[in-house]
Image (tube, rainbow, N blue to C red):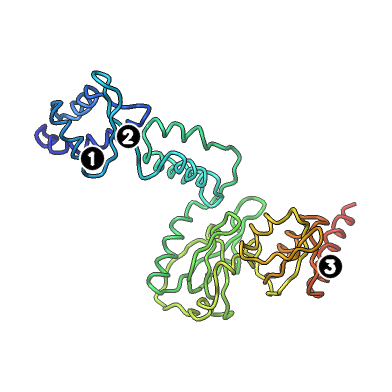
Amino acid sequence: MARSENQKLKLLYLMDYLMQHTDEEHPARMGEIISELGKRGISAERKSVYDDIEALRLYGLDIELSGSGRNTGYYVSSRDFELPELKLLVDAVQSSKFITRRKTSALIKKIEKLASVYEAKLLERQVYVSGRIKTMNESIYYNVDEIHSGISENRKIRFRYFDYDVRRERSYRKNGEYYLVSPFALTWDSENYYLIAYDSENAELRHYRVDKMSSISTVDEERDGLEAFRKVDMGEYSRKVFGMFSGREEKVTVRFASHLVTPVLDRLGQDVILVPDGDGFTVTADIAVSPQFFAWITGFGTEARITAPESVVREMREHIASVAAAYSQAE
């Protein structure tokens, strides 16, 4: 690019330099700014840079002045995202099982560009945690894109669904045959991403882990099951279905020790009604009864007990007995 053409980009290069290389602890002096512009083939005088900085301020860039005399420096005081907010975003990406290691690294690099180069180094030191579990399915991002296409275009999607075997190889369900469903929503539960879709063959809503889907594509067939989906409150759906395992829905009453309010609200939602009961409290909620629900209750030991209905109490006893029997056989 010729020098005269570079000159036209002066304001943009100046903005990029201030955004990437300055913050409150690292202001840029006028000589440094002129030198950086010179590296890009742009000649600049102090007065023209002053005018450019003022133009950027009028544009909305929060540029502050630091020091005085020869020590005067300029820096970007605030950005769309403050450093604590970026730390939260990076940590969320780093800790998510849904995002693969390779994609985690790529996303963090992009988030770092929202800060100065100096703050980006703080982000790198802040969030690294070894040993976090990550999905092995790199195609998950294309899956999400294809699912959104099906939803926006009112089309069904088809895909193959798999589990991993002990050799970490894919073992496809239905002998590798394709599933055909009507996609309606994506939801997050227990650190995994799920598709909520209508299964016409069984006339019901079902959910599928997105990272266990492969060979996904839209088909030239309109979705059905819209009325069934409209009847579902997604917030309620997520609270009822433990670990996204389905079960028959029951109104279940559980008595908890008084100090367990926080985990109960975390799992059942802030709107659930807590009824004080001596040194504890009871909760009645619509629950999809499943082994995962029983496991959640069992995790509290003797400090949580299902009290109604009797059919669920009986199932809980059977669940505990079957687990105990499995350990007895092991002896």
Residue at 43 percent of width and 45 percent of height? 107
Out of 82 and 91, give the one closest to the viewer. Answer: 82
Other-residue count near label 3 (Cα within 10 Å), few / some / many at <14 / 14–19 / ≥20: few
Q: CA distance from mark 1 to mark 3?
A: 70 Å
Which amino acid, by three-letter code, is at mark 3? Glu
Out of 184 and 175, give the one closest to the viewer. Answer: 184
- Badge 1 marks a residue whose secondary structure is helix
Q: Is residue 316 above or below residue 141?
A: below
Provide residue 327's location: percent of width, then percent of height.
86, 55
Which amino acid, by three-letter code, is at mark 1? Arg
Other-residue count near label 1 (Cα within 10 Å), few / some / many at <14 / 14–19 / ≥20: some
In the picture, the disc for residue 20 is 2
Which amino acid, by three-letter code, is at mark 2? Gln
Q: Are marks 2 and 3 in contact (CB under 8 Å)?
A: no
Write down the residue under mark 1: 57
Provide residue 191's location: percent of width, then percent of height.
58, 54
Other-residue count near label 2 (Cα within 10 Å), few / some / many at <14 / 14–19 / ≥20: some
Residue at 11 percent of width and 34 percent of height? 2
- Badge 2 marks a residue whose secondary structure is helix
Q: Residue furthest left?
A: 4
In the picture, the disc for residue 318 is 3
Q: Residue furthest top?
A: 70
Q: CA distance from mark 2 to mark 3?
A: 62 Å
Q: CA distance from mark 2 to mark 1?
A: 16 Å
